[in-house]
Image (spheres, rainbow, N blue to C red):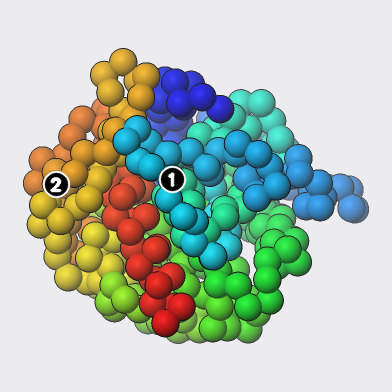
Amino acid sequence: MCARRFLIAITILTLLIVAGAFAVYQFGSGVLRHEFTPKGHYTPPPPRSGPDYSDLNSWIARPDIPHNAAQWLPDGVSRGKQGPAAVFYIHPTTYLKGDVWNAPIYEPDSGWRDQLFTQSQASAFNGAGEVWAPRYRQAAYGAFLLKTEDANKALDLAYSDVSAAFDEFLKHVGPKQPIILAGHSQGALHLLRLLRERKAQLGNRLVAAYVVGWPVSTSADLPALGFPACGSADQAGCVLSWMSFGDPPNPSLILGDWEKSKGPAGGKRRQEDMLCVDPITGSGSPAPPSSNPGTLVPNAAFTSATLLSGAVGAHCSKGLLILDGQVPNLGPYVLPGNNYHVYDYALFWSAIRRDAERRLAAWQR
């Protein structure tokens, strides 16, 4: 996919991400329930009708798909020697229709958005290793508006595909090869479950898990994962999570229902227990704008993308990652409450790339 198509689509894509973020975080749920909740009850798909992950068509990116989206790099970034890690990336919600509970494995409208997400997010990890990114029967974002059996089944089906893709991934990577896991929004939600259920298989192979754009409780979620929070930049085998907000932040619209829920480790989820790792420092320590190596910024004509260094800093406060400095014009799609969910990866693209390579080096030591 050419860079021009990618950048032109950013304006459309950010709007679509906003729609997904509203749904995921329960904002404006009355209107969304009416417009986007799938009609009728969840119907299980026919047996053995799921994606065949031995087929390249079931993947957005994997090493044997030439010129795949995860290999993209912004202007001015050279392709150096690739690290030895295997990266498993789960894209966020891209299916925006309300006709079914789960998206088809491939559908033209969501299919090219899957490519764009993979290009703009998973590409941050291609210096550390080869990226694998599955297509999956994602839950339509209307499923996030309800706490019903239908919605739970839709999420379970989406996760079953992610789990099956991970099995195929493990067949191909070396038995001692280091692994990086990454996801965003719905992808991060499935990644949390994957960490819980596959911690024995991951063992000491995990370099890091980037659970971005989804709240993680250090008391109600993290202990069930079997991996600690990342406390320093040179730590491997740990979990990073952040949710980006401008100052002053107002997360009440997105955390209201989450704080009423319980995590798999038991106990109630609370904002004061949310995990926040600054991707610039790789820890809970603050970072001045000068230390950010690059924010991904499209030009005015959306014909190319460049990295702007030293513009955006960040610090953790009450579980949120609060932006400092001068945020460049990334587009008009900041969510209510100063929520920069749309830009969780773009704001720190180079820092994420550096962080992954640094943790890989720590793992190798």
Residue 53, image x and y in percent?
78, 52
Q: Earlier in the sequence, mark 1 or mark 2?
A: 1
Mark carried by residue 249: none
- Quarter placement of the C terminus: bottom left
Is residue 152 toward the left or the right of residue 266 in the image? Answer: right
Locate residue 282: give its quadrant: bottom left
Residue 54, image x and y in percent?
81, 52
Badge 2 crowding class, 10 Å Cα cut-off, few under 14, some 14 to 19, many 20 or more, is some
Residue at the image position 28 percent from the left and 23 percent from the top = 299
Residue 251, image x and y in percent?
26, 54
Residue at the image position 60 percent from the left and 39 percent from the top = 68
Is residue 50 visible in the rendered image? The answer is no
Residue toward you, 257 or 222: 222
Q: CA distance from mark 1 to mark 2?
A: 22 Å
Residue at the image position 55 percent from the left and 72 percent from the top = 178
Residue toward you, 27 or 312: 312
Judged from the image, the secondary structure of the residue bearing numbered disc 2 is loop
Mark carried by residue 310: 2
Badge 1 crowding class, 10 Å Cα cut-off, few under 14, some 14 to 19, many 20 or more, is few
* As drawn, 255 above or below 1: below
Residue 79, image x and y in percent?
43, 45
Q: Residue furthest top?
A: 301
Residue at the image position 31 percent from the left and 15 percent from the top = 301
Tell me the amino acid under the disc marked 2. Answer: Gly
User: Which residue position is annotated with label 1?
Assistant: 79
Residue toward you, 84 or 167: 84
